Image (cartoon, helix red, strand yellow):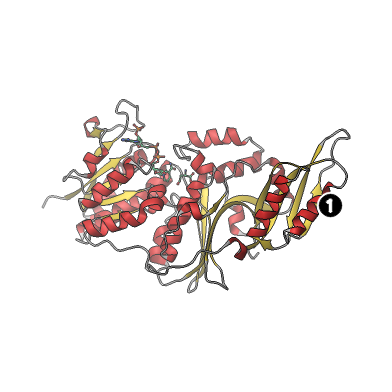
Amino acid sequence: MSERVIKVGLCGFGVVGQGVFNHLRKREKLLSDQLGARVEVARIAVRDTSKKRDFEFDASMLTTDPVSIASDPEIDVVCELMGGTGLALEVTLAALKAGKIVVTANKALICDHGERLFTAAKEGGGQILFEASVAGGIPVIKAIKDGLVINRFSSIYGILNGTCNYILTRMTNEGASYEKILEEAKALGYSEADESLDVDGIDSAHKAVVLAYLAYGRWVPYKDILVQGIAEVTQEDIAFAKENGYAIKLLAVIDVAHASGKLYISILPTLVSKKYVLGSVDGVHNAVSIHGDVVGETVYIGPGAGRDATASAVIADVVDATKLIVNGGAGRFVDPAPRNGDQIELAEPEEIESRYYVRLEVADKPGVMAEVASMLAKNEVSLASVTQKEVEENATSATLIITTHYTTEKAILEAVKALEESSSVKGKPFTMPISSFED
Ligand code: NAP
Ligand code: HSE
């Protein structure tokens, strides 16, 4: 009997698409032995057919029309690896409507259109798999969907953006400049086509929305989340972190408040204790700590971006897709959020408490320290420490670094706004939470 062939269409042949192609080809025999079917890349969509690629391939597979792959009856599995939410949505919907299995690494797409895509999968008899959309090579979606299925989750903390963690780590270890490291992250294929999505925290927010849906069954618009990127982190902040046993991480917090049961999500540069596992996860690595009521805390660490790591996660989905087809389960889409319908409320800023770090540039004149302390006190923010580095005799401004006792997010946001409006404060103060993880 001839071997069954599962035909894969790659929509996108850039960093991730070429990684998928390369590893599927290298392990073709192993996979076909395991699956009882041969997985074959049959068509590839790109924007520019004349571009030089990193691997040899049959150019007759190329097209500039990814929708034609989505609707091609010969294609069993469509891998959407282009990015964006325009054409990517069109391609994904077309494939799902045609009853195909779509594998995507596109977190923006799942975040913005997950509900619509899951409905299209149910109605069209297709499937959508998106392991690579969160935390690169770490199989964290499988962990939440399958491995932890019996748990209810009290919190998920994550370093979810490889580019940002790579930049922060190298700024910390080498004192290298933000701009230079960002260029290197781009060259390594870590960043998004529009790298502002990474450094402004939006990519992490997309991923946090996906995780929150999987854990709590609610699609939270990412625009409702407090998001701050890493562009304002300076060597002064890093020096403070080092001196005090912290690392600065762009941290996603997805938390259910004990008292109110409300859901809180934020993406903020955060001082994370080096004693806590996430404080020591460096470079392009991501980490996700999940607290489940049955299992306790589980932590997942691994490369969060890059060709091979992401290809590993995409191929895991292609293999699952092949099993569904071979075993006849492709037509039954199972919503990955078993807690669907829990319409959990979102917490308000006055319900969130943390300690905070504030760095501000103040006029170097008498009485400024008292003025700053008074503005913070008016907003119910109590100081834990204040540091001012000695300045030159003729300096006109000085940097103050303040840490606070526990206060609410609302109070710190209002206090910082008041500081920003003060004539004694130059520019915008920089604030970040100080993590409250147990040692
Ligand atoms: P990329 O290197 O920019 O590749 C994008 C590919 O899509 C290119 O081959 C491009 O064609 C093709 N493409 C773009 N617009 C197209 C159009 N209109 N018609 C046909 N083809 C088009 O991006 P990537 O880094 O591989 O990322 C792809 C997806 O994976 C994104 O959703 C990203 O967020 C996600 N992801 C990336 C990583 C990572 O580490 N890079 C990790 C996890 C998830 P040309 O080559 O001809 O320009
Ligand atoms: N640009 C993303 C990152 C790719 O740096 O994490 C992985 O999703």
Left or right of 286: which side holds 424? right
Please identify the residue farthest to the left as the structure is shown.
Answer: 1
Number of numbered markers: 1
Q: Quadrant of residue 142?
A: bottom left
The residue type indicated by label 1 comes to Ala
Ligand 2 is within 8 Å of the C-beta of the residue at disc 1: no
Question: Residue 346 location in percent, x, y?
Answer: 51, 63
Question: Residue 209 location in percent, x, y?
Answer: 45, 56
Q: Quadrant of residue 40?
A: top left
Residue at the disc numbered 1 = 370
Q: Nearer the viewer, residue 265 or 389?
A: 265
Task: Using the rendered image of the protein, determine whether residue 27 is visible from the camera's viewpoint.
Answer: no
- Residue at the image point whose x is 57% and y is 73% from the top: 259
- Residue at the image point whose x is 30% and y is 63% from the top: 334
Left or right of 210: which side holds 438? right
Question: Residue 309 location in percent, x, y?
Answer: 43, 46
Q: Nearer the viewer, residue 245 or 69?
A: 69
- Residue at the image point whose x is 64% and y is 43% from the top: 233
Q: Nearer the viewer, residue 425 or 299?
A: 425
Task: Using the rendered image of the protein, determine whether residue 269 is visible from the camera's viewpoint.
Answer: yes
Left or right of 98: which side holds 243? right
Q: Is residue 354 above or below residue 269?
A: below
Quadrant, the C terminus: bottom right
Question: Residue 281 location in percent, x, y?
Answer: 57, 52
Q: Secondary structure at mark 1?
A: helix
Q: Residues within 10 Å of mark 1 (few under 14, many from 20)?
A: few
Q: Is residue 21 above or below residue 220?
A: above
